[in-house]
Image (cartoon, rainbow, N blue to C red):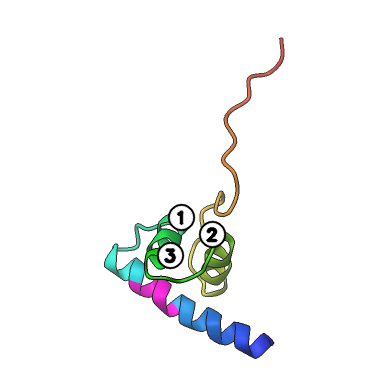
Amino acid sequence: MRAARQAVDAELAARIRVILRASDGTCGVPRITAELREDGEVVNDKQIARVMQASGRPVPACAGGIARPFRTPPR
């Protein structure tokens, strides 16, 4: 099971590198996920962030999370 996941992650990492190279490294997790989904891959943001982090790529802090708006302090 672990070897199968590592093989899938290695293939996914290679596809992520291709997408990043084509965009000069400007794509983030959501855009990479969208690109892979357009190609028919079944992936999500968390999976992409995990693979990028494992391969040493910087992952934005909000990857896979919800951006929360600034909250004003109570009066």
Mark 1 residue element = helix
Mark 2 residue element = helix
Quote the CA–CA distance across marks 1 and 2. Answer: 6 Å
Q: Tell me if residue 43 is in the magenta stretch.
A: no
Mark 3 residue element = helix
Are there few (<14), some (14-19), or many (20+) residues within 10 Å of tag 1? Answer: some
Are there few (<14), some (14-19), or many (20+) residues within 10 Å of tag 2? Answer: some
Are there few (<14), some (14-19), or many (20+) residues within 10 Å of tag 3? Answer: few
The part of the chain drawn in magenta is 14-18
**Pointer 1 or 3: first along the chain:** 1
* Residue pointed to by mark 2: 45
* Residue pointed to by mark 3: 37
Quote the CA–CA distance across marks 2 and 3. Answer: 11 Å
Residue at x 29% of width, y 63% of height: 24
Could you say which quadrant of the image residue 37 lies in?
bottom left
Q: Tell me where residue 74 appears, x and y as whole percent.
A: 71, 15
Front tag of 1 and 3: 3
